[in-house]
Amino acid sequence: MSLFNNSSCCGGDTAGTTKEKSKCSGCVCEILNQLANHRMNGNLCTMGSQPVVRLVLKGSDRGLDVTGGGGPATEFTIVSFDPRTCCLVVTHREGNDTITSVFDCRCICGVVCARNGGSGFTGTSVLG
């Protein structure tokens, strides 16, 4: 499967289709779209601020740690989500640096709200 032919990097059933509306129809993609585009009723993670989440990738049973140190899951700030391309743009801090990452939402099976209004980890989970 090519990464350059509108197919999912995760081997979803949308490979080769041209239906834009169904491309990112999974529950995690929809939650990320709502969080990124401020459409979440009740402010699930944010309480009015930018959402900070931990991501669980498909095939994993724990949150993604991009530092490679085996520590706790990385806390990502959601920057944007494009429902047309399924691209989630997030940032995280490493020391004094802000690192930007891009994920295909179809490769994510879970979202854990990491902060609720800056008060620390809430433990709230939105799993797909």
Image: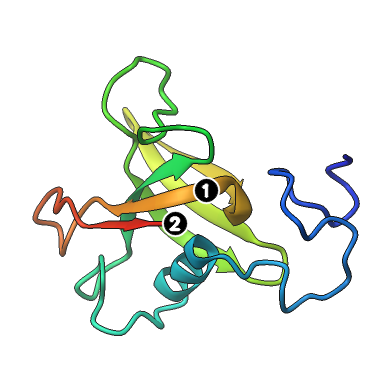
State the SS at label 2: loop
> Element at badge 1?
strand
Q: What number is the disc on residue 128?
A: 2
Q: Amino acid at mark 2?
A: Gly
**69 relative position to 16: left or right:** left
Q: Is residue 77 left or right of residue 32?
A: left
Across and down, in percent, residue 33 comes to 50, 71
Q: Amino acid at mark 1?
A: Ile
Q: Is the residue under label 1 in contact with that under label 2 (CB below 8 Å)?
A: yes
In the image shown, does 71 or 97 lie closer to the viewer? 71
Tell me which colouring the rendered structure shows.
rainbow
Q: Residue at x 65, y 61 (%)?
A: 86
Question: 10 Å neighbourhood of mark 1: few (<14), some, or many (≥20)?
Answer: many
Q: Nearer the viewer, residue 107 or 101?
A: 107
Residue that extends furthest to the left in the rendered view of this protein: 119
Vertical order, 116 against 1 (above or below): below
Q: Quadrant of residue 51?
A: bottom left
Residue in view at x 58 percent, y 55 percent: 105
**Badge 2 density bin: few <14, some 14–19, many ≥20, Cα 10 Å:** some
Q: Which residue is mark 1?
A: 108
Q: Which mark is residue 96?
A: none
Q: Is residue 125 above or below residue 10?
A: below
